[in-house]
Structure formats: C-alpha cells, structure tokens
Image: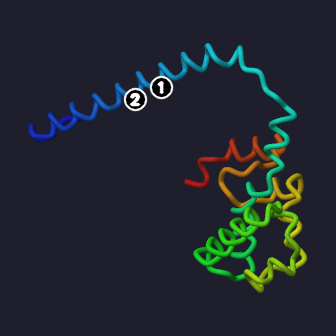
Amino acid sequence: MKALPSSYNRDIQEDKKALFDSVETIQSALEVFAAMLPELKINRKRMENAARDSSLLATDLAEYLVKKGTPFREAHQIVGELVVHSIAKSVPLDQIAVAEMKKFSPHFDDDVAKIFDVPAIRWHSDALSALRRPRTSRRRSSAGANWWRNL
C-alpha cells in the first residue's frame, strides 16, 4: 500500500473494523455449532416426509416453462397461481392433472411429470446450488493439473 495519498489511510483503517467484526461473528457462530452438532438428533422419517412436498419443486416447474419458451417473469406468475390453486384445492402440486395445468399455461405437457421425479431430476438441474454427480477422479485430476492453461 505504498504511495497512497494520505486521505486514503483513514478509509483503509475503517474497513478493517467491519472485517474484524465479521470474523468475531463467524467465530462465535462456529463455537455454537461445535457445541450443538454433537447433540443433534435427526428425525429421518420427518425429514423424508418434508422433502416429499411437491411445492418445493415450484422453481423447477418455472424452469420447465422457461425451457418451453415462456419468459421467466410469466413462468413465475403461472407457477405462483398454480401453487395457490394447489393449496386452495388441498391437492399436492404433483397430483394436479396435466389438463388442469394447461388451464394455467398451454406449455404444460405430459413430460411435466418428470419434474416431480426427484431422484431423476436432482442430477440434471442447471441451478448452481443443485446436487451434482461427483466427477471421476481422472477428470478432476486432469482439470486440476491443467488449471493454468485456461488463464
């Protein structure tokens, strides 16, 4: 940080306080998690039942419509209305007939059922947070060994 005008010195000092505060917050949170995790008990049955809620796949349903040519803004609106309809009728999203879905958008087709096949779709999602199949070690090692060539 040589040759900075003297007016910058104060700015550089002020950003350190926020950094140190965030480090302290993270350290405190990690201490709490370290104490909490050994006592954590997971109710597998309840977790599996919660994961089966088809409403969790509403974003995937919107992505389905986008892939069929619907602008995302409209797809979001359509799926929102479909979710409201699902709740009002007390019918899970995955149990709504395709003919009923077509009332909300003509882009719904028989292949919409694939959206609700969680084991099949979890490996194919384009979302950054989606689960991915692990790469083979050969691919990983070759990509890691040659990372500098992409610079």
Report the disc number at residue 106.
none
> At numbered mark 2, what does the secondary structure look like: helix, strand or loop?
helix
* 75 versus 137 height, above or below: below
Q: x, y (%) of residue 117?
A: 89, 58
* 37 versus 54 height, above or below: above
Q: x, y (%) of residue 96?
A: 85, 69
> At numbered mark 1, what does the secondary structure look like: helix, strand or loop?
helix
Amino acid carrying mark 2 in the image? Ser
Q: x, y (%) of residue 47?
A: 80, 37
State the quadrant of the N terminus: top left
Left or right: 137, with 82 as reference point: right
Report the disc number at residue 26.
1
State the count of labels. 2
- Name the foreground residue: 59 vs 18: 59
- Name the foreground residue: 92 vs 63: 92
- Residue 83 appears in which quarter of the rendering? bottom right
Amino acid carrying mark 1 in the image? Ile
Residue occupying image coordinates x 68% and y 58%: 127
Furthest residue toward bottom: 106
- Name the foreground residue: 55 vs 13: 55
Label 2 sits on residue? 22
State the quadrant of the C terminus: bottom right
Q: Do the residues labelled 1 and 2 touch (CB within 8 Å)?
A: yes
Residue occupying image coordinates x 87% and y 81%: 99
Snapshot colouring: rainbow
Mark 1 burial class by Cα count in 10 Å: few <14, some 14-19, many 20+: few
